[in-house]
Image (tube, helix red, strand yellow):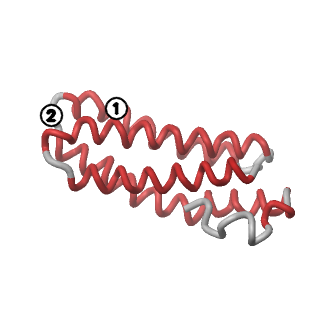
Amino acid sequence: MHSELSQIHVAHRSLRQLARYLRECGEQDVAQAYMEVLRATEHAFHAEHRLMEAFDFPARQCHLEQHARVLRALHCLHPAVMLGAHHPARHAGGQLLMDWFHLHNTTLDAALAVWVGHCAPTLTDQSEIPPDWYR
């Protein structure tokens, strides 16, 4: 389970870095950067989904509904981004996503971390899991 927690931590860090790149990259790179943000978001959400299922997380449905709404918004914008809508891509994928992600991490992901710690107290040994794995 430690490896799943580490994967989520790495996926979240990667998503933040890609969103920052999307905000700062040149116009010619926006479409590709947006696609990378979209893929990183899908990857992070999939890793969280596996963890929620493994521990039968009681708030799983609410958590997954938030993920689904975010992915829907990103996918709906994707065709316009491919046609050159760079400002909306930077705003949605680079800024709004990160604003939502911060709130999501400090609420639902934090609750998931508490649940995992409750279900598997041996996994919450300070030497094994960084206290901010969900960020």
**Picture residue at 71% right of the left edge, 45% below the top:** 51
Give SS at disc 2.
loop
Q: Are marks 1 and 2 in contact (CB under 8 Å)?
A: no
Q: Amino acid at mark 1?
A: Cys
Q: Position of residue 109 (x, y in %)?
A: 62, 58
The Cα atoms of the two marked residues, 1 and 2, are separated by 14 Å
**Picture residue at 24% right of the left edge, 49% below the top:** 90
| 59 with respect to 83 (left or right) | right
Q: Position of residue 82 (x, y in %)?
A: 22, 29
Residue sitting nearer the eye, 45 or 4: 4
In the displayed structure, would residue 20 be above or below residue 29? below
Residue sitting nearer the eye, 71 or 120: 120
Res 127 quadrant in image = bottom right
How crowded pointer 1 is (Cα within 10 Å; few <14, some 14-19, many 20+) is rated as: few
In the displayed structure, would residue 81 be above or below residue 121? above
Instruction: Residue lying at the far front in this picture: please name it.
Output: 127
**Picture residue at 63% right of the left edge, 54% below the top:** 6
Residue identified by numbered label 2: 84
Q: Nearer the viewer, mark 1 or mark 2?
A: 2
| 87 with respect to 7 (left or right) | left
Q: Position of residue 74 (x, y in %)?
A: 37, 38
Location of the C terminus (image quadrant)? bottom right
Q: How many marks?
A: 2
Circle number at residue 25: none
Which badge, 1 or 2, is on the more N-terminal residue? 1
Residue identified by numbered label 1: 76
Give SS at disc 1.
helix
**Picture residue at 56% right of the left edge, 43% below the top:** 45
